[in-house]
Image (tube, rainbow, N blue to C red):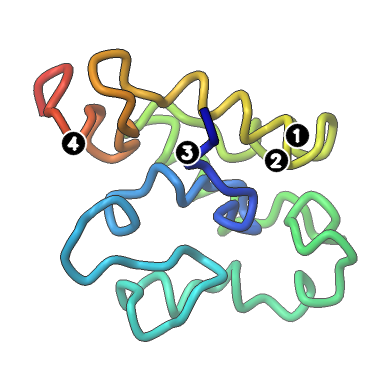
Amino acid sequence: MESTFSTTLIAPCGIDCNLCLAYLRNKNRCEGCWGNNESKPHHCSKCSIKNCVLLAETTSKFCYDCPKYQCTRLRQLDKRYRLKYNVSIVENLMNIKKAGKKAFIEMEEERWTCKNCGGTICVHRGCCLKCNGNVC
């Protein structure tokens, strides 16, 4: 079975856009952090991390290569994701740095694929939007 998860949907901060509600929805679908800004929620297109000049100078285009890693904004975002969604984007970044994007995506796919229908579990809702598994 071919993967529906893509390494191009990993944001520089470590958020996996494959799991994002804005990417998974059918109407006005976001193309992910690196996609077209027109389809993104305003807070994503104006993201201070994605638009960071220091990030633009890194080879990897991930925050772990930034001289200011872990900046205040990244720490705040990580805290929010840990508390609200039980996901650490800093941990994601360390896994990407250690194992690479492909291995990270394989781990994410294993963790976030719905056991009921094979769809993707939305990180923001905690359930599969395709079959409403685990009660959305």
Instruction: State how far apart marks 4 and 2 are (Cα).
Output: 28 Å
Question: What amino acid type should be assigned to the residue bearing mark 2?
Answer: Leu
Whether pointer 3 and pointer 1 mark residues with C-beta atoms closer than 8 Å, the reply is no
Q: Which residue is mark 1?
A: 94
Q: Earlier in the sequence, mark 3 or mark 4?
A: 3
Check if mark 2's residue and mark 1's residue have beta carbons within 8 Å: yes
Asked if the residue under mark 2 is in contact with the one under mark 4, i.e. CB atoms within 8 Å, the reply is: no
The mark lying in front, picked from 4 and 2, is 4
For residue 52, side relative to residue 130 (left or right): right
Tell me which label, 4 or 2, sits earlier in the chain: 2
Determine the secondary structure under disc 2. Answer: helix
The residue that disc 3 covers is 79
Which badge, 2 or 3, is on the more N-terminal residue?
3
Residue beneath disc 4: 130
Horizontally, residue 39 falls left or right of residue 64, namely left
Q: CA distance from mark 3 to mark 1?
A: 16 Å
Which amino acid is tagged 4?
Lys
